[in-house]
Amino acid sequence: MRDAAPQTVYLEDYTPFGFIVEAVDLTFRLHPTATRVLSRIRFLPNPEASDRTFFLHGEDLRLIRAAIDGREITPELSEAGLRADVPDAPFTFEAEVEISPATNTALEGLYMSSGMYCTQCEAEGFRKITYYPDRPDVMAPFEVRIEGDQPVMLSNGNPGARGADFAEWTDPWPKPAYLFALVAGDLVAHRDSFTTASGRKVDLAIWVRPGDEGKCAFGMEALKKSMRWDEEVYGREYDLDVFNIVAVDDFNMGAMENKGLNIFNSSCVLASPETSTDGNFERIEAIIAHEYFHNWTGNRITCRDWFQLCLKEGLTVHRDSEFTSDMRSAPVKRISDVIDLRARQFPEDQGPLSHPVRPESFQEINNFYTATVYEKGAEVIGMLKRLVDDDAYHRALDLYFERHDGDAATIEDWLKVFEDTTGRDLSQFKRWYSQSGTPRLHVREEYEGDTFTLHFRQETPPTPGQPDKGPQVLPIAVGLLNPNGDEVTPTQILEMTQAEQSFTFEGLRVRPIPSILRGFSAPVMLDHAEGKDRRAFLLAHDSDAFNRWEAGRELARESLVQTVLTGAASDAAYLDGLKAVIRDESLDPAYRALMLGQPTQSELAGLLYERGETPDPEAIHDAAEGLRDAKAAAFAGLLPGLYEDNQVPGPYSPDAQSAGRRALANAALSLLSRRDHGAQAQAQYDRAGNMTEQLSALSALIDAGKGDLALGRFYDQWQGDRLVIDKWFALQVMLAAPEETAAVAERLTQHPDFDMTNPNRFRAVFGALAGNHAGFHYRDGAAYRLLAEWLMKLDPLNPQTTARMCTAFQTWKRYDADRQDMIRAQLERIAALDGLSGDTSEMIGRILA
Ligand code: PHE
Ligand code: ZN
C-alpha cells in the first residue's frame, strides 16, 4: 500500500520509451479480494528510442505468471515494477496478476464503491491493475474481456460480444493507460442518443445505482448540449458508437474522461430539483462538458508526459468556460471564474506551493492537479486568444487538431500552432508556462494637452525556486469613459511586454476615466491608486460588466480593510453605489446577486498580508459581519421588494434566468434575516419546494442563530440521500461561530453517518473546516489540531485526498507568530508519522520549506 521512497522526476530528463505497444488484450476475472488480470501485450522495438530497457510499472500486484512469446519467464520484480530480458524484435508479453479491489481504499486502480467495481487510472493508477508502461506517451488500442456475474460490465470503446458471465469491449482509438476504465455492478441506465453532424448515431447512457435513475435527465441534456457545442464551435465530432457515464459514490476527484466511459463522482452528475441547488446544476453541466471535451483535448491529443498536464487541463477548462458562457451569462461566468481564481489560485501562487503552469519537477504527480495547472492554465489560453483574436485562435486550434491528432504532445507543439498560424513569436509569452507567481501590475495616469497616458509597471515577486522573474506578455483591455459616464474609447487590448511601458491616447479634450483590465484580461493583481470617488463612478457607469462589478468589489475590500485596521464604519459611498445597482431592474438578477456578495475573509487576510499587515482572523470576521449588517440596514427598505419580486413561481427549472432570480432573492433573504431574526427564512424553509430554497433558508436560519430545529428536520428528511447529507455536514461547520467551529466539526466526526473512507463526506466536514476562516484560525488552535489528527488517520487509507487537504495549511506564513507556531507543530507532527505516504510527505515538505 505504501509508496516506495519518493523520487523527484524532472521535465528535462524526458526520454521516449524503448518500445511501441501495438495492441493490448486484457481479461479481468472479477473477485472482490482476488481479481485476476490477464494481459497480452504486443511490443515492437521503438526506432526513436536509444534505451531498450524493458521495464514495466507495477505496484501492489501479485504476479502469478509471466511469459514472452509463450515461454514462461521469471522477471526481476521491485516495488515499482518488473524488468525482463526481451528479444530485439517484436514480441508478445503475457502476465497474470492478482489484485484486491475490495481492500483498495486509496481509490486508485481497480476498487469497489458501494458494491460496484470501478477504476481510476489517471495519473499513474493503471500500474496498480497490471504491469504496463504506465506513461501517457505510450498509446495503444485495447481489447477488454470482463468475466464475472455482475449485471452490467463496461469498459472503453464499443461493445462486443456479451454473455451471461462475460462482456467484451474494443477501443479502436490508441490511448494511454491512464484513460483505461472498467465498471461492473448492479447498475441501471438512463438512455438517450445523439446524431453527430455527419449523421452517425451514438448511444448515450448514464449508469447509476438503482434508485438514482431519476437524477440523470439533467446530466443527459448537458451531455447532448456539449456534443452539439463542440461540433459547432470547434468542429469536433464524437468518434465511437457509445458514450457511457457512470456515477460512483467514492471518488477522489470530480470526474474522469476515460475514453468512451467517463466516471463521475456522483456529486458531479446526479441532479434533481429536490436534492440539488442551482449551483450544483450549473457545476454538473460544466463538468459533464469538461469531461466530454476531453475526448478531443486530452484523449485524441494527449500529453507526452505529466509535466504537460496543462496542455489538456488548461485547454479543457478554457473550453468548458466558453461553453458555460454560451449556455448562460458570459459576464456572470467571468466574474464567477475570477472569484474562484482569487480564492484558490492566487493563494497557491503566493505561498510555498507556488509552481509554474507547467511544473519542471515533481515527486507525486497527483499533487499537481492544482488550481495553477487548471485555472491559471485556462487563463493563459484566454490571454492567447485575446492577443491573436478569436478568428486566429480557431484557425490555430484547427491546425492543432489536424497536426497532432493521435499524438502525445507538448506545450511547445501547442504554441507552435499559434506561431505558425499568426506569424507571432511566442517565446516571451511562453514564460506564462514556466514562471510561477502572480504578476503585480501598477498603473499611473497622466493627462497633458489632449493626450492621456497610462504608465504601467509590472513585477512578479520571487516564488520557491524562482528568485528572479522576467516581464510577462500582458494583454491589458482598456476603455475610456468621459466624466458623464459615456464611453469615449471602446475596449482595446494594450499589449504590454516590458517591465515598464506607457500607452497614449490622443485627441481627448477632457480628462478621461480609464477602465483598466476589463474582463480581467490577464491574471494579475492590479494596483491602481484610484480614489473612492473614481471607483464609485465606475460602479455606476462602467460599460464593462466585469469592471463594474470589480469597482464594487474594490470598494468593499477597502471598506473592510479600513474597518479591520481602524475600526471605521462601513463605507457609505459603497453602500449608496451598491444600492443603485441592485435596484436597477435593467440588470440581470444573477449579476445583481454577485454584486451583493463580498470578498471572503480569507481573501481579506491575503490582502492585509500583501500590505504588510498581520491579519487577525477574528477582526476580519467581525468586519465581514459588520458589513453585512450595514447592508441589511442600508437596504432595509429595498430588501422585501427584492425578495418578493424575484420569487420564481411554477415548477422548478434550473435555467440561468430562474437560477439568477433565486440567487438574488436568496441574497436578499440572507440580509433580511439579520433583522427579522429568521422569520422570513423560517417561512421559506417551511414552504421550500426545491433544494436551492431549502438550503438557503436553512443557512439564513443558522446564521440568525435559529437553525437547530430546521437542521434536525433536514436530517430526518434526507437521511437516505448521501449527497444531501454531505450538505448537512458541511453547512454546520461552514456556518459555525469561530469559537465553536472545531467542536462542531469534531462532534460531526462522531456522527454515525460520518465515514472517513468516503472522500465527499470527509471533505464535507474538513473542507468546510478549512473554509471557515475565523473558525479554522481560532486562537486556541483546536481546528489545526483536529485537522492534523484526521489527516493522520486518513493518510494510510487514502493518500491522495489527504495530500490534497494539506493545502488548508498553505497560507500559514500570513499569520502571527503564535498561530504559525501552532501550525508548524501540527505540520511537523504529520511529517513524523510512521509510514507517511509519499503524496502527503511531499506536500508537508513543500509547505514547511
Ligand atoms: N482528468 C480529470 C479532469 O480534469 C481529473 C482527474 C485527475 C480525475 C486525476 C481523477 C484523477 O477532468
Ligand atoms: Zn480535466
Image: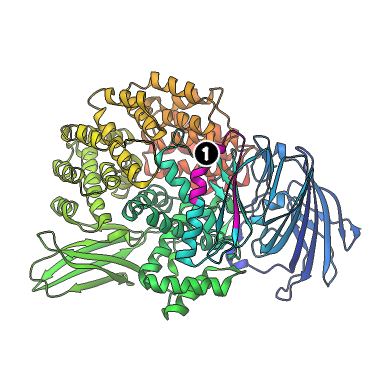
On whether residue 210 falls in the magenta region, the answer is yes
Q: Position of residue 606 (x, y in %)?
A: 34, 46
Q: State the quadrant of the N terminus.
A: top right
Helix, strand or loop for disc 1: helix
Residues in magenta? 202-222
Is residue 434 among the parts visible in the rendering?
no
Q: Quadrant of residue 712?
A: top left
Residue 355 vs residue 255, the one in the foreground: 255
Q: Position of residue 794 (x, y in %)?
A: 59, 35
As drawn, 156 above or below 99: below
As drawn, 103 above or below 543: above
Q: Position of residue 291 (x, y in %)?
A: 54, 54
Q: How many marks?
A: 1
Residue 720 vs residue 104, the one in the foreground: 720
On whether residue 220 falls in the magenta region, the answer is yes
Q: Quadrant of residue 153?
A: top right
Is residue 164 found left or right of 844 in the rendered image? right
Circle 1 crowding by C-alpha within 10 Å: few under 14, some 14–19, many from 20: many
Colouring convention used in this rendered image of the protein: rainbow
The residue that label 1 is drawn on is 215
Q: Position of residue 530 (x, y in %)?
A: 18, 56
Is residue 401 found left or right of 589 in the rendered image? right
Is residue 320 among the parts visible in the rendering?
yes
Residue 643 vs residue 739, the one in the foreground: 643
As drawn, 249 above or below 411: above
Mark 1 residue CB less than 8 A from any atom of ligand 1: no
Q: Amino acid at mark 1?
A: Lys
